Image (tube, rainbow, N blue to C red):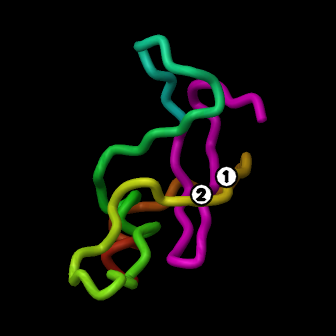
């Protein structure tokens, strides 16, 4: 998938889905890598299962990514979930 700055993508997994805007890294990153800072948008994709540890797994979250023309997910809609 060829993504460019400003594209909208839908990120979805069994925990939720969000639509966000692609921003190109200013660093030289390897292709095929996506990174999302900790935020309400990334938290929507964090599984609730803690594996008995009591702490959700905030890193290495797997999600499907697809181009979309849908509106970007608002903070208000995330809070209302």
- Count neighbours of disc 2 (C-alpha within 10 A) and say few if under 14, some if 14 to 19, many if 20 or more: many
Question: Residue, x 68% and y 30% (percent of image)?
Answer: 3
Question: Residue, x 31% and y 75% (percent of image)?
Answer: 79
Q: Residue beneath label 1, please?
A: 65
User: Does residue 39 lie above or below 33 as drawn?
Assistant: below
In the picture as drawn, the residue positioned furthest to the right comes out as 1
Q: Position of residue 31 (x, y in %)?
A: 63, 24
Q: Are marks 2 and 1 in contact (CB under 8 Å)?
A: yes
Question: Residue, x 53% and y 62% (percent of image)?
Answer: 18
Q: Nearer the viewer, residue 79 or 48?
A: 48
Q: Position of residue 67 (x, y in %)?
A: 73, 46
Q: Which mark is residue 47?
A: none
Nearer-N-terminus badge (2/1): 2
Q: Position of residue 8 (x, y in %)?
A: 62, 43
* Residue 54 drawn in magenta: no
In the picture as drawn, the residue positioned furthest to the front comes out as 52
* Residue 20 drawn in magenta: yes
Q: Nearer the viewer, residue 13 or 56?
A: 56
User: Does residue 61 lie above or below 25 as drawn?
Assistant: below
Question: Residue, x 45% and y 54% (percent of image)?
Answer: 60
Q: Which mark is residue 11?
A: 2
**Boundaries of the magenta span:** 1-21
User: Does residue 28 lie above or below 25 as drawn?
Assistant: above
Q: Position of residue 57 (x, y in %)?
A: 34, 67
In the picture as drawn, the residue positioned furthest to the left comes out as 54
Q: Quadrant of residue 54?
A: bottom left
Q: CA distance from mark 2 to mark 1?
A: 5 Å
Q: Quadrant of the C terminus?
A: bottom left
């Amino acid at each position: 998938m060829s993504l460019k700055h400003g594209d909208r993508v839908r990120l979805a997994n069994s925990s939720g889905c969000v639509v966000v805007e692609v921003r190109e890294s200013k660093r030289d990153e390897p292709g095929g890598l996506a990174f999302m800072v900790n935020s309400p948008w990334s938290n929507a994709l964090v599984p609730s299962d803690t594996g008995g540890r009591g702490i959700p797994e905030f890193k290495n979250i797997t999600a499907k990514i697809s181009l979309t023309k849908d509106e970007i997910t608002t903070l208000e809609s995330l809070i209302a979930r």
